Image: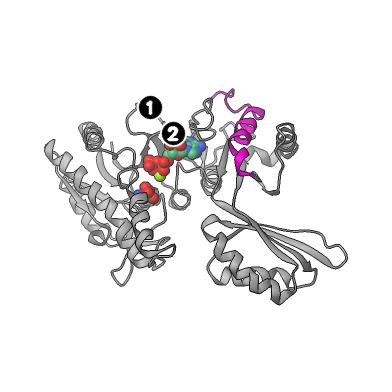
Amino acid sequence: MGLIVQKYGGTSVGSTERIAQVAERIAGYLAKGHQVAAVVSAMSGETNRLVAMGQELGGEYPSRREMDVLMASGEQVTIALLSTALLRRGISAKSFLADQIAFRTDAAHGRARIEHIDTQKLQTELANGVVPVVAGFQGVNEHGEITTLGRGGSDTSAVALAAALEADECEICTDVEGVYTTDPRIVEGARRLQQITFEEMLELASLGSKVLHPRSVEFAGRYRVPVRVMSTFAEGPGTLITLENDNMEQAIVSGIAHSTEDAKITVSGVPDIPGIASKILGPVGGKNIEVDMIVQNTGVDGMTDFTFTVKRQDFQPTLSLLDDVAKDIGAREVTGDNTIAKVSIVGVGMRSHAGVATKVFDRLASENINIQMISTSEIKISVVIAERYVELAVRALHDVFELDAQPD
Ligand code: ADP
Ligand code: ASP
Ligand code: MG
């Protein structure tokens, strides 16, 4: 018994039938004596639909303020529908938009960060036996403007709310039965993990595993919120995100993530002199464009090449920006490729095992997949390859590290 914050994702609230099932699931928890606060996403496909309409009228770069007002409307529908379904079952429930519970964020439209949540109202509702149904993904800044937390952000709303309410657990209820060794939609033999460390989950989420929004994992680690990823409609324990624990069997590789949201840019024929990286990347950062992997080749005859990746949505703006920069620094040319994929293997056990990278390179070579860029850290290895090989690469690496064969 205790307070549980439950987040229901888009598929879980994708139709009125499913919303009724979610209400039934919540009723089951209440019957066992738990208190529940729910956080919901928009119906599946709804946020995409809203974005497409905004872009149709606003062009590729519509007003960010208006896009947030537009996108946040998806969650307004589902909180009202879920509360209605709960009320129909005789359960006291009340929907809340972000500004009704002072869910405060900074002012960065489209990728706002949570600053503070006023829990007093929710505590009072909970104490009165009410199930608060809170709109995920949205916030409000200090001037009362609507903000959103970035795509997939309702996971973060839920974990932040669980932290603020000091809940006993935060359940992320979704359309798969937990966190798997890789996306179960790509590898049929992917295995559900019983538990995974915050550290590994943060890497997987940041490297493209959509099952959790990266910032939700950051919150969970920082505020020590036990988070469990589980299915909304199938019974089962799901996957617990835990602090590292000595008894935990440390698999060398715990999971594989992939992302097809990046693009690669190369500035060739750059003079190999001090300050060149800052001359290239300075203007990019100045436009708030996030740079991920960076590689500078060893100089030959005083010239070098410089390659880095950005989010695919920033591909064209970065290329245009670099046209001027290239002239300024005397670079030969700027080229780009927005059909790349990043595949990453993650595991805390990698720290103490040599030869993991070799295994990755050998297997990709035997599949005839060319590696374009490599980046490593203590617990991950990422490679950039052509997008068309992404599924093949994920399957091959899942196989070579025998991820489906290990016991839970
Ligand atoms: P929701 O709408 O409930 O937030 P998402 O679509 O955002 O659901 O996230 C769940 C999806 O994440 C799954 O359907 C699955 O395809 C994908 N996914 C990617 N990597 C993994 C992984 N390692 N384990 C489980 N699911 C994953
Ligand atoms: N509805 C938002 C999105 O589609 C937030 C979420 O689902 O987490 O990105
Ligand atoms: Mg999601």
Query: Foreground: 188 or 140?
Result: 188
Query: Counting other residues with Cα less than 10 Å from the Cα at mark 1, is it few (<14), some (14-19), or many (20 or more)?
Result: few
Quarter holding residue 304: bottom right
Q: Residue at x 14, y 43 (%)?
A: 92
What residue sits right under mark 2 in the picture?
Answer: 178
Query: Counting other residues with Cα less than 10 Å from the Cα at mark 2, is it few (<14), some (14-19), or many (20 or more)?
Result: many
What quarter of the picture does the N terminus occupy?
top left
Overall secondary structure of the magenta section = helix
Task: Check if residue 400 falls in the magenta segment.
Answer: yes
Q: Residue at x 64, y 33 (%)?
A: 397
What residue sits right under mark 1 in the picture?
Answer: 236
User: Which of marks 1 and 2 precedes in the sequence?
Assistant: 2
Residue 213 in the image, given as x and y percentages of width and height: 45, 48
Element under label 1? loop
For this view, does 100 lie left or right of residue 319? left
Q: Is residue 215 visible?
A: yes
Please tell me whether residue 198 is drawn above or below residue 195 in the rendered image: below
Please tell me whether residue 300 is drawn above or below residue 175 in the rendered image: below
Query: Foreground: 362 or 401?
Result: 362
Q: Is residue 290 visible?
A: no
Q: State yes or no: discs 2 and 1 in contact (Cβ < 8 Å).
A: yes
Element under label 2? loop
Residues in magenta? 386-408
